[in-house]
Amino acid sequence: MNIRLRIYDTKEGSQTVHCKLWNERRVYLRSDSDNMPIPIENPQQHIHFEDRLAGHFPHVPTQGQAELIHAFSRYLFSDQPRCTLMVRGYAGTGKTTSVGAFVRALREIGAPTVLLAPTGRAAKVMQSYAGLSASTIHRQIYRTTKSSDGGTAFGLAPNMKENAVFIVDEASMIGESGGRFEKDKFQPRSLLDDLMEYVFNGAGCRLVLVGDDAQLPPVGHDESPALNEEKMRRDFDLTVATIRLTDVVRQELDSGILSNAHQLRLQIDAQHDGFPQLDLSGHKDIERLDGLELQEQIEDLYARYGEDQVVIITRSNKRANQFNQQIRNRVLWREESIEAGDRLMVVRNNYFWLSGQEAIPTTLIANGDTLIVQKITKRFERYGAPFAEAEVRLVDFPNHPTFEVCLHLSALHTDSPSIPPSEIQALQTAVAEDYMHLGSRTAIKKAVAMDPCFQALQVKFAWAITCHKAQGGQWPAVIVDQGYLQDDMIQIELLRWFYTAFTRAQEKLFLLNFSPSFFSEEK
């Protein structure tokens, strides 16, 4: 079977047929040297799907993409148990294009396909390039019930899919925490554990994990566990094939954002500490920004793109708080502690406020979800803390209706990622005192679990966020704040931070207060 592939070359202004090139790659990929560890039962079926998949690429696949096409096809038709394909790729290597083509080819042959991502924003990005609805992992795999004490419990939902392909993007963000809590265990389960259990509980289901292992790993990890091939085989008894895309697509190298991100990636792979050699010459999509220019630049970007399309990425919650207050006071001219139009990021999972909302197909407001305040209906202080009743909407789920919540405003200004556990415990004790008249311990616990102040949503302002919060998202314009820095701090972990921050930008990247030591032309 021949395949006709066309590439549009903007420089030449012409279209070229590349059938011969693709056929040569097919011969190479099917040679005896092929060591793909997943055998297949029907080679002819595999070849036909490979041709079909290649036809969904908008351009001639790179060598790496051609190998990935081959891997996708073999993976799909393997009869190996707990079949998993791990796709790791640098920014700009066509990973997104490849996965999008795979999704379209699967839909074309009627294969059940489920798209997942760790956060709402990452799911939204995935949906945009795949052309198929995507969900967060939490929303897909968990279901909520009422606990015996009147609160909300959540457990693993049944996987009713058969022979489905589960594709999980931004897999580098999946850590070994954040799962469901089992009362008979001493600690919560891992989200990774729960995801594996859910997927492979479905008959004949298989898994694709997509990610960039140069990005920041989950908090508390030195590397991303979901992209560790040896760990996944050992811990979950998976049949794993891996492929890594390393060749940056030629067109992408014209981007200053991606060419500099690529240099960071090479330095990370080489495990070389020290200042990277950033090169901004000849690139209009990346530029340096002085702190004195920041306010004017933000005003210009908001006018050009809109508030929701611009973000500042910084290295600490303290710095994010400072930026957010300056933006509210000097750019948006907000005077109240919280107002209609404020952008908020949820910093702790909450299952309370959406329970009973029939028009919204989930009970989870997830850590990392972004909200827009539609209206403030009440401000008050209780139990020594500030609260507000508000009507809000979820930014990354525009089809969901607005809903009412109680907001715990202390989190807006704390320098920790969320309200410290000690303060939450003190709040629980104070709320319980209001229900002592109920008598029994069970009745008091039920009342506390249903109390709006105890269940108040923890949020921070979201014009400036940390890199971990930005991970999985993309914005047209991104401002990266260097923050406090000494020469001996330029180690691999910080290079991962810069790499992750740089690759959040789609059109324009600003480097705020970056030291001259970062730039090759000034060394």
Image: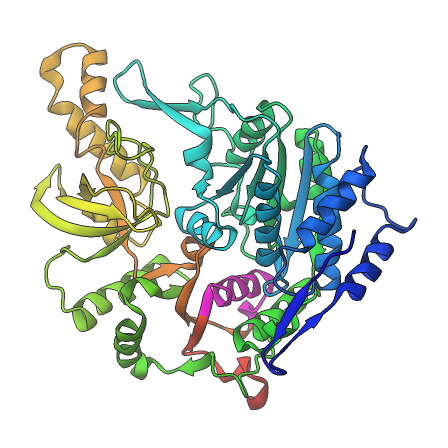
**Which image quarter: residue 213?**
bottom right
Residue at 44% x, 76% y is 511
The part of the image, by quadrant, that contains residue 203 is top right
- Residue occupying the point 70% across, 42% down: 229
In this view, 306 is above or below 427: below
Q: Nearer the viewer, residue 341 or 71?
A: 71
* Residue 288 appears in the picture as rendered: yes
Closer to the camera in the image, 228 or 513: 228
Give whichever of 463, 4 is nearer the camera. 4
Q: Is residue 238 left or right of residue 120?
A: right
Q: Residue 227: x and y, percent?
A: 63, 46
Q: Is residue 523 visible?
A: no
Which residue is found at the position 73% from the left and 36% from the top?
A: 77
Q: Residue furthest bottom?
A: 522
Q: Quadrant of residue 204?
A: top right
Name the residue at the right extreme: 32
Magenta highlight range: 488-506
Q: Nearer the viewer, residue 25 or 252?
A: 25
Q: Position of residue 404 (x, y in %)?
A: 17, 39
Residue at 70% x, 38% y: name it.
76
| Placement of 52 over or under 14, stated as above or below | above
State the quadrant of the C terminus: bottom right
